[in-house]
Image (tube, rainbow, N blue to C red):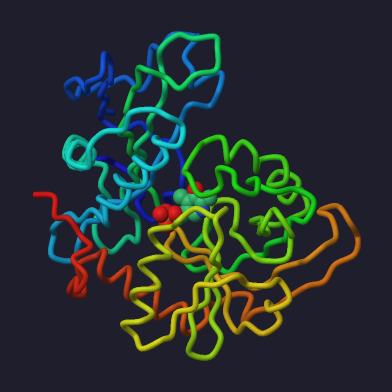
Amino acid sequence: MANLDWTKLGFGYRKTNTILSCSYKDGQWGPVESHTDDNLTINAFAGALHYSIECFEGLKAFRGADGKVRLFRPEENAKRLQRSANYIGIAAPSVDRFIEMCVRAVKENIDFLPPYGTNASMYLRPTLIGVNPQLGVKSSTECLFLMLCAPVGAYTGSTLQPSYVVISRDYDRAAPNGTGSFKLGSNYAASLYSYNLAHKLGYEAVLYLDPLHHQYIDEFNSSNFFAIRGNSYITPKSDTILPSITNKSLETVAKELGMTVERRPVPVEELSTFEEVGECGTAVVITPVYQIDDRPALESSEVKPYYFGSKDQCGPKSLKLYQMIRGIQDGEIEDPFGWCLLVD
Ligand SMILES: *Cc1c(COP(=O)(O)O)cnc(C)c1O
């Protein structure tokens, strides 16, 4: 086992044993190759470098209480990658190839898989890039699919640490009828200016609104939005948000726990009625949010704050949802939905 302090892992790059690659050329996918060097050689005219012909995924493998290794819903990520690739007009690996590479990456890097009980896991980063040399704007005809991994702990600080966020009214991450629902690196590039500005102002995340009217809540820069009021789990319905697999799983778990699930447009003003608010995504499942500031512009001195629960504790309903998902991932509670793929 790698000599790491598993309890102190953040979310960052770490050299592991191998990365995997698979090339698409002349209309077909080649063999899967394993590399000990993380540096790639690609043509400087590759479309990925000029026109952001790139999409990616993120999923996790966990060492369970029973010693078994589980991948959480990899088929969902495989299908979402296909949807992203289709939008930018490039080939995507089959669901089987995608899953085969997830499994192989875990096996080749098994000494970097954090042990059970550390709340750390192995993050997999499937990445698909257009690599044939080009100058004109065209979808790539040759692609490189990579399966990268890294052991990770809590994304920022400790687990379930409530965060402080700001609404962005002067910058959007996605355009109306644009790319917001696809997992493209270019969406992140588009969010960096406002994200950096918010960081300088002391915020941990940015909450974007529907880009057409700036009336309804969309999502955070890298995670979906959910709220709890009474016995309801409420999450926005919008064409410009990324369909989070964590959010979809939380909806299922909420129903299982007898809660009502509402997926509908969520007006900003409704924030004043929520008891709990959270960010959700693969990295940490849930990050509770204790304060959301609404400003006419990020740098405006005018602030309308909304508060949710405690500054140092996760709300009770969010905690229940979190524990059920983490319990399934860690093999502590049975997997009633067949979400986990065992890696043997
Ligand atoms: C990946 C991502 C999420 C979270 O999706 P999960 O499938 O739950 O990891 C949320 N928002 C954006 C913008 C994303 O890129």
Is any part of residue 282 visible from this angle?
A: no
Q: Residue at x 55, y 17 (%)?
A: 137
Figure label count: 0
**Residue toward you, 199 or 259:** 259
Would you identify the image quadrant in which residue 64 lies?
bottom left
Would you identify the image quadrant in which residue 329 lies?
bottom left
Q: Is residue 288 left or right of residue 260?
A: right
**Residue toward you, 43 or 142:** 142
Would you identify the image quadrant in which residue 303 lies?
bottom right
Q: Residue at x 68, y 79 (%)?
A: 270
Q: Is residue 303 left or right of residue 339?
A: right
Relative image position of residue 152 (x, y in whole percent): 39, 48
Q: Residue at x 42, y 49 (%)?
A: 9
Give above or below for 185 relative to 325: above
**Residue toward you, 234 or 122:** 234
**Residue toward you, 208 or 138:** 138
